[in-house]
Image: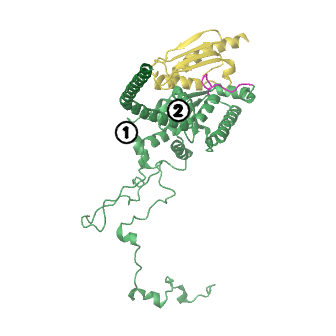
Chain colours: A yellow, B green
Amino acid sequence: MITKYITAVSTAFSPFNARSGKTVRNFLALLPPNARSKMAIDVKMFGQREAEKPASLSLTFKDGKEMAMDLEKMKLKDIQTEVDRHSRTLRRVEELSG
Amino acid sequence: MPPRLRLQPSQLRPVRPRTQYVCWQCRHASLASATTPAPPIEQTIAAVPPISRYPPTQPPSYKPPEFRKSQLHRVYQSTLRSSPLILLFQHNNLKATEWSGIRRELSAALKKVDDDLAKNAGDSAYIGSGMKLQIVQTGIFASALKVVEFWDPKFEPEAPTTHPADPQTASSTSIEDTKPVASDPGFKHGLSKQAYLATKKNQALRHGLEPLLSGPLALLTFPDVSPQHLKAALSILSPGPDFPAPKRRVNPAYHEKAVQDGLQKLMLLGARVECKVFDTQGARWVGSIEGGLGGLRAQLVAMLSGIGAGITNTLEAAGRSLYVTVEGRRGMLEEEQKGGKEGGEEQPPASSA
């Protein structure tokens, strides 16, 4: 996953929700080690009792685009594809501009 | 031409195998009336298990034991059984310097708690030195947790129901724990086939930690449930309003870049306290118990004795109030009598005079 062009990550999830919790946690694990200095990461965790509350994941890119992921339908692979698609366009723009 | 080797024809015959020399006594030993030594007493009472195919220190493992993951499985089973309190964290790409910084701060804080407890409460258990923050292989940990939760090795053997001298025992009764096969229930170790089948057989069993066992996992293990140590650990690893982090003036090393960057990448997921699953809030609640487990027991004792005293008071109340009323009335009557007597005594002297 190309993470160079992400500027902010904002999530809210419950680790006890098997589907959305695992997706969000594995997404956070894909961020590189020096990511925290370059992007603003906001994580809000629900408890065991709020496991059924809908989870949210939204990303902001360098060009200002905000992408909100629908965690009911998307798995980790789908999220990666979406992020990569936008990041590749940004990369092309950057290469062309110098 | 004559042969180069001068061999006689007798030497060319095939050599008969030479038998080992046996002395005359040994050769005729079978004819003698020698006595065999008596078997040990235990052998006459119970059946003797056959010679085991596997040495007792290397019982048969279902999966190949030479793989690192089999040995990690054993290590994790042992950790789970010996740690009544385990905190689960997710670690997102922490660097080695960040890990060493975090472990340094954690051990310093725990040592302080240990010293405080040893000095003030006389509790020299030094739990902090037995605590470890370690990364685990999530898949193997999940498998080890299933074995620990769902497999009961039954170390106390059931009393044998068949006695060889009992006339009711059939002569062809088979005795358990005598088959030298890998799947024999006599093997009670966590890597045995029995342990593996116990986790596979019933897929509906759940231990509650399943959703957390995904992605990179790190554990903080406590050798004993100690809310004071938990409070110190949480104030370092996942500080919050209830467990504040040490201030910069008090502990400047805690606020260096490596430690702070690492702590941002550590996420507390939940806790396993005495085989029960708690979430972040539950873990914080356990940490907020004042005075540790000793204090909790003291509170419980005080509450129970308070209940007893309350019941006694309630039952005595009727009798006590009756007694108080009667005493009060008696006092009043005595006063009236005294007053009447004094009044009576005062009058006659006045009349006589």
Q: How many marks?
A: 2
Is residue A17 highlighted in magenta? no
Q: Earlier in the sequence, mark 2 or mark 1?
A: 1
* Nearest-to-viewer mark from 2 and 1: 2
Residue at mark 2 = B271
In the visual, does B153 lie left or right of B3? left
Residue type at mark 1 is Asn
x%, y% of residue B325? 38, 26
Q: Mark 2, residues whose alpha carbon is within 10 Å: few (<14), some, or many (≥20)?
A: many
What range of the chain is rendered magenta? Answer: B238-248
Picture coordinates of residue B5 (x, y %)?
62, 85
Q: Residue at x 54, y 38 (%)?
A: B294
Q: CA distance from mark 2 to mark 1?
A: 25 Å
Residue A53 seen by the camera: yes
Label 2 marks a residue whose chain is B
Label 1 belongs to which residue? B202
Mark 2: amino acid: Ala
- Frontmost residue, B163 versus B114: B114
